[in-house]
Every structure is written in C-alpha cells, then in structure tokens.
Amino acid sequence: MSPFPFSRRRSAHGPGVAAVTALGLVTLVACGAGDGADSSARKGPVSITFWGWTKGTQEVVDAFNASQNDVRVKFQEIPAGNAGGYAKISNAVKAGNAPDVFNVEYPQLPDFVSRGAVQDISEQVPGDLKSRYLPQAIRMTTLGGATWALPLDIAPQTFYYRTDVFEKAKITSPPKTWDEFRADAQKIKEADPQARIATFFPDDASAFEAMAWQAGGQWFKPEKDAWKVDFLDEGTKKAAGYWQKMIDDDLVHVAPSFSQQWTASLQKGRTAGYLGASWGAGVMGSTLPDQSGKWAAAPMPTFDGSAASGMVGGSTFAVSKDSEKAEAAVRFAQWATTTEASIKARIKAGASSAYPAAPKLVPVAKSAFKSALFGDQDLYGLYSDAAKSIRPGWAWGPVMGATDGSLKDSFAKVQKGGDITTAVREAEKATTKELRKRGIKVTG
C-alpha cells in the first residue's frame, strides 16, 4: 500500500510510493463542503459519529446540532491522543467500526494517511474554504496534493509562569534566552529547594520535538523520491544537550504530562512554570482554580534571544477511510473550524484557549476567552506574535507513531542513566526501520 494512499479517484499508475511521500513532506513544512447540505443530508437528517478530546468539544457539537436539522452529530469523548486516543482510533479502523470523523493532531496526520486510515476529502474542500485558514495550517493538512483534514487550531509554544514564585526568587521578568531560563531555574531552586522552574515530560515526545523545532532542527526533508532522515542535526543536538544538563543538574522536575504528580506540584507552588502551547492556558485555568491572578504568559525563551517557536500539537478533523458520509462529516468539520458560533461555544466552555487556524476567528476567541488565572493579560495578542515566529522548515514524517514511541521508551530512562541524545538517536533508527518496513526509501 502506498504510504499516502489516495482516494478511489487516483490512478493505479499515479506517483510511486517514495515520490508521493516526498510530495507529502513538502506540503508539511511549517512556516467547504459549501454552506449547503450534502446530497444525503437533503433527503433527511444524516447521523454521523465523532470521536475527540479537545476541550469544549461537547459544547461545539451541541451548538452545531442546534444550528440546523440536516446533520446530527453523535459525539464520544475519548482520551487525548498520546493518552490512548490514537490507539483506540487505530483499533477501530482495523475492526471496521471507526467513527465518521475524529480529531487527529498535525504530527500524527501523516501516519494515519500512510496507513490508509483516513479519506482524501479534496472534493469536499474547495479553494474558497481553504482560503479561510492560515496557509501553514493548510500545508500541514495537505499531502501529495490532496487534502486529508480540516485544521482546528495551531499551537505555538508559550511559557506560562507563576509570578509570585518568580518574585520570591527575585526574578523581575520572564527569561528571554535559555541561558536566562537556566539562571532563573537556579534562583527558584535556591529560594525553595523543593521548587523547580518547569518540568521535562518523559511521556510526551511532542514537547521535546517542539524544542528541537524551535532550535532549528529539521528531522525530515524531501528529496525527489525519498525521505531524508536526520534527527541529530545541530539544532536538535543543541536542544538535547541543554535539556539533558537541566535534568542532570536537577533544575527541572521530571514527571508525566498532566499527571496527578504534575498537577499537585503546580497546586503546591513547587512547579513555577509550564513550557506549553497556546492551548495550555485553558487547561491550566481549569486545573488551578484557586490561583487567580498568580500566573502570566510570555514568549518562549530562545538560544539567541530572537523570537522563534515550534508547535506542540494542534488539532484537525479527519474523515475515517470507511465512512460513507464524508460530505456530512466535512460539513460538520467546516462548521466547527470556521464559524463564530463554534469558536464561541468552544472557548466559553472555560477550558479551551485554542488559537484558531482560521484568522477571522482569532478576535472571536479573544473576546470569548476569560481566565481569572492570568488576570487581564492579552494572551491572544501573545499567541498571534508567537504564531508569526513559528520556524519554517520543520516537517512531520509518516511514521510518527514509531518515532514518538521510541522517544517515550527512551525518555523514561533519562533519570536512570539514559540521556536525551541517545534517545533521539534510537528514535531515528526506529523511524528508519519503520519507513523501510512500509516500503519507503530513506536517505540520511
């Protein structure tokens, strides 16, 4: 099977495996259906199933169902992707009982495409619909010239920090460079031996991948008929060395992301910062209801002090391969990603601070977002600046499940004799092995 299988419209004599893969890589470099009902919907209400986990989704589904009578969405909340959601979706696809539409993040979309788990929805996504989204979001949902999903948000990196803990450590402003971040980490530890400036998440490869991206790393590059794979470029080695030393010197906690351990540390003031993304403010607001006004957000520190960001996650809506209701599914996805009513429903639920992939919805999100945790800070202005600083050149490969699985296994050992650079090297080997297993040519 081709790594990027096309719809039934594709000729059997179309591009070869490696050529299509390389084309897909180009479209992933980082920086509808019409408003009428589909043909099946015009015959009466069409019922579609939807699986997802993004905050505020139930409210979005309720608002969509209340807005029209042609399509009825039955929503099932599943664990976040890295917490088991992707395994559940993959198993459902294999069993032939997948939902019509589901959430998938940008890093995992090429993997779902390469395994033939999602449909080419190009026919349901005309140019005027694509124009409503940020170009980089469209590039990340386009592979081999085909459209495979509709983007919900983009997720530039953001540093959230607890202002009172910083003040106690006599830190007057958030760090602009990683050298300043390390110096501030030492001050926070000296002021409170149990406190740390942030946490390294061994279970979440995407957090480190964003660090490598921000530092200028480019793990996958397109060639004429292959993928070039190089996980240990200069940017990645710089990021890996930096975080390894932070761990070795006990300047950051090491704990699973969004775990009880991590949450308790935040609640007790023993974790003074969170290196997250734009969607993180909503999560933190619902996690720390008793810390109103004690947090602020800042641009991510960088190695040279110049603005730069990677992305942590960012979600899309994809249609499963066996769905016979693609038009209705895309109609829902379009509504959920491009209408004021949808973003108001999502943000007003109180747990989402998603930065919309549709630029016209950013003012709507800003107006709807309320967070006592961050006081009156203009978070969406910060996110807009961060979005502009997302480094171009990064691309997601088609076997990120294998990549992330290897990183997760190795990161679990970083406090027991393992190290990040070795973890990245092992992930490159696992990735190359999986690519070749799928018949994809690899250079490097």
Image (tube, helix red, strand yellow):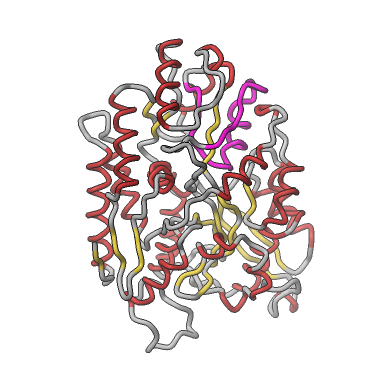
Any magenta on residue 392? Answer: no
Left/right placement of residue 382 relative to residue 397 reads right
- 36 or 228: nearer the eye? 228
Left/right placement of residue 35 relative to residue 356 reads right
Q: Which residue is at a point 46% across and 63% down the rendered structure image?
A: 28
- 91 or 53: nearer the eye? 53
Q: How many marks?
A: 0
The magenta span reads 271-299
Q: Position of residue 402 (x, y in %)?
A: 31, 55
Image quadrant assignment for residue 352: top right
Q: Which residue is at a point 42% across and 56% down the rendered structure image?
A: 394
Q: Position of residue 105 (x, y in %)?
A: 50, 54
Any magenta on residue 293? Answer: yes
Q: Position of residue 118 (x, y in %)?
A: 48, 68
Left/right placement of residue 211 relative to residue 403 reads right
Q: Which residue is at a point 27% across and 33% down the rendered structure image?
A: 414
**On-image quarter of the N terminus:** bottom left
- 430 or 18: nearer the eye? 18
- Look at the image and tell me whether residue 312 can be seen: no
**On-image quarter of the C terminus:** bottom left
Q: Position of residue 371 (x, y in %)?
A: 69, 32
Considering only vertical position in the picture, is 373 above or below 187? below
- 277 or 110: nearer the eye? 277
Considering only vertical position in the picture, is 333 above or below 266? below
- Look at the image and tell me whether residue 56 can be seen: yes
Residue sticking out furthest to the left: 417
